[in-house]
């Protein structure tokens, strides 16, 4: 299919990017630091670090990795922490030392950590003390030789650092006892690095930047191989797309999604860095009252998040006290954006909330809605520059008919090299000519906008008819008494499967009949849920994606 989306491409956005601007991510970091030396780069819990400070500490950390730990180019280092000031210093320090970063979800169990560390061949780890007891359990069974432990407030000024760390450890009791006598402290690592000479490492576009693990909610986690070229490409694609609205040296970005997640990593930590933006790091986005206090203190120009995050914010009584006069745009990704959430956000903030789409294997951004007002609610927008997409049917043939669904396939410079040491799994998703099979069912409209119908594996089959959970959830979410909803298929002896929904109430008076009657207004009969179960909360990943698999089981 021809690139039908280009006829409606946003004004000012070129269809292709220039991949020769930078040789590696280190050049982007150094350029941003040089141009914004005294500008605040990161804010966390009221503490600020300038670009100059981040560069100094990143090079100290790189020198520590090179001289004290004797790590070599290509060695893997795991980073396991939420959004803290230490995170970008560890990442950019690792890059400057030529290392490969393995981001690790802090909420992993000990067995999940063991699998990832052994699979990636991790040799060193930077870990928050809150999770060090898990590391202690599995450390002898891994190749990890060096451990750096950090606490939440390690980069806060004294005495705030002492107070916060003491409260977390002794009052809130959030740090289980651990015994890692060989471990360095993060501050100690920086101090040691400051006494050594940092030696710049030659890093090419083809060198691996991240082993970004994915698939943990649907099977064994696999490491997507993302090179400096992959991440650079996606960063430049995002910059090109946002360039019509965002300006250098004036943006303040709300970073609530954890930076170990590929969405926040590429968009917030890297692309916004190109703008010289200040990232406001939210360490615990589930603490909505504290979250809103941060928003009050730090009026943002751009917000990124997931559907459940926006929904939770708007359901807080304090949300209406916030000032959104500086907010230019909000972006939703990682899960489907419900129309009710999108429309309510626009009503309450007066700004657009646009949906994008990506996946870890594509660094991650594939499609985004235009940010100039030409967005279409209910779609994921259009492919970003230098990106091709096509739809294929179950027989692998391209779907060219407008409106007909097919599996979404992507080709572009942001697509991964494959899964780390998993050639068979790689062959299943990457074709010989570079197409990535996403496993998502999508359709084009006549204007070139793309709509995700659903994940193939989440599809519900009712008497031979396909029912897409997103469609059911979108219809039910528009009921004023519904706070959150998830739809799954359950076995039925007559029709094979029927629809069941799990709902968190916004209004206590909401009944099963209310839900079903409301569904009938917009859903054909076989899509209307046959079962409704009310819950106080829905299971989610650490970034807020609802775990349908957990609900099905």
Image (tube, helix red, strand yellow):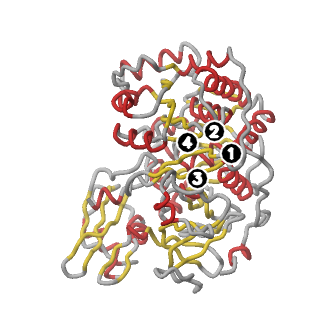
Is the residue under label 4 in contact with that under label 3 (CB below 8 Å)?
A: no
Q: CA distance from mark 3 to mark 4?
A: 25 Å
Around disc 3, counting alpha carbons within 10 Å, would you say few (fewer than 14), some (14 to 19), or many (20 or more)?
A: some
Mark 3 lies on a secondary structure that is helix
Q: Position of residue 379 (x, y in %)?
A: 56, 69
Q: Which residue is mark 2?
A: 279
| Left or right of 55, for residue 351 | left
Q: Position of residue 169 (x, y in %)?
A: 39, 21
Question: Which comes before the other along the chain, label 3 or label 2?
Answer: 2
Q: Which residue is mark 1?
A: 272
Q: Position of residue 28 (x, y in %)?
A: 74, 42
Which numbered mark, 3 or 4, is in the foreground of this view? 4
Q: CA distance from mark 1 to mark 2?
A: 8 Å
Specify the quadrant that holds the C terminus: bottom left
Question: Which comes before the other along the chain, label 1 or label 3?
Answer: 1
Q: Which residue is mark 3?
A: 349
Question: Which comes before the other along the chain, label 3 or label 4?
Answer: 4
Around disc 4, counting alpha carbons within 10 Å, would you say few (fewer than 14), some (14 to 19), or many (20 or more)?
A: many
| Left or right of 89, for residue 404 | left
Q: Which residue is mark 4?
A: 259
Is residue 359 placed above or below 212 in the rendered structure? below
Q: Residue at x 64, y 43 (%)?
A: 253
Is the residue under label 2 in contact with that under label 1 (CB below 8 Å)?
A: yes
């Amino acid at each position: 299919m021809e690139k039908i989306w280009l006829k409606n491409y946003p004004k000012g956005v070129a269809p292709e990017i220039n991949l020769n601007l930078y040789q590696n991510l280190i050049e982007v970091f150094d350029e941003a630091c040089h141009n914004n030396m005294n500008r605040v780069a990161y804010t966390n819990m009221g503490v600020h670090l300038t670009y100059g400070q981040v560069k100094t500490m990143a090079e100290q950390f790189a020198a520590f990795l090179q001289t004290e730990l004797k790590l070599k180019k290509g060695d893997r280092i795991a980073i396991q922490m939420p959004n803290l000031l230490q995170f970008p210093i560890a990442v950019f320090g690792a890059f400057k030392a030529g290392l490969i970063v393995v981001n690790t979800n802090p909420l992993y169990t000990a067995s999940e950590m063991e699998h990832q560390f052994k699979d990636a061949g991790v040799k060193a780890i930077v870990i928050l003390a809150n999770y060090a007891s898990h590391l202690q359990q599995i450390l002898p069974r891994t190749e990890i030789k060096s451990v750096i432990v950090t606490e939440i407030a390690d980069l806060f000024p004294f005495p705030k650092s002492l107070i916060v760390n003491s409260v977390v450890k002794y009052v809130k009791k959030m740090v289980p006892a651990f015994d890692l006598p060989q471990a360095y402290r993060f501050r100690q690592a920086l101090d040691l690095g400051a006494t050594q000479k940092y030696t710049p490492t030659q890093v090419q576009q083809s060198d691996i930047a991240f082993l970004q693990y994915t698939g943990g909610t649907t099977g064994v986690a696999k490491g997507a191989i993302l090179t400096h070229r992959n991440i650079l490409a996606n960063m430049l694609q995002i910059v090109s797309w946002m360039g019509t609205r965002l300006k250098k040296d004036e943006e303040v970005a709300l970073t609530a999604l954890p930076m170990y997640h590929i969405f926040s990593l590429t968009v917030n930590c890297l692309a916004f860095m190109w703008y010289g933006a200040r990232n406001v790091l939210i360490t615990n986005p589930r603490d909505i009252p504290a979250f809103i206090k941060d928003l009050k203190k730090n009026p943002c120009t751009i917000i990124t998040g997931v559907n459940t995050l926006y929904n939770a914010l708007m359901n807080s009584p304090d949300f209406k006290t916030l000032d959104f006069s500086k907010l230019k745009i909000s972006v939703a990704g990682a899960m489907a954006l419900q129309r009710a959430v999108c429309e309510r956000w626009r009503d309450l903030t007066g700004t657009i909330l646009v949906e994008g789409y990506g996946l870890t294997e594509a660094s991650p951004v594939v499609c985004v809605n235009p940010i100039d007002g030409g967005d279409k609610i209910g779609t994921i927008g259009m492919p970003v520059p230098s990106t091709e997409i096509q739809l294929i049917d179950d027989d692998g043939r391209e779907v060219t008919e407008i409106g007909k669904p097919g599996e979404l396939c992507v080709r572009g410079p942001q697509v991964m090299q494959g899964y780390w040491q998993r050639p068979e799994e790689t062959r299943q998703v990457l074709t010989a000519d570079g197409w990535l099979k996403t496993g998502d069912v999508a359709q084009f409209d006549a204007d070139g906008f793309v709509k995700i119908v659903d994940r193939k594996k989440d599809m519900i089959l009712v008497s031979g008819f396909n029912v897409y959970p997103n469609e059911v959830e979108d219809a039910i979410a528009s009921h004023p008494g519904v706070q959150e909803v998830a739809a799954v298929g359950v076995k039925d002896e007559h029709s094979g499967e029927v629809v069941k929904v799990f709902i968190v109430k916004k209004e206590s008076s909401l009944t099963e009949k209310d839900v079903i009657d409301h569904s009938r207004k917009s859903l054909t009969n076989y899509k209307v849920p046959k079962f409704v179960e009310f819950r106080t909360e829905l299971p989610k990943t650490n970034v807020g994606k609802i775990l349908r698999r957990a609900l099905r089981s």
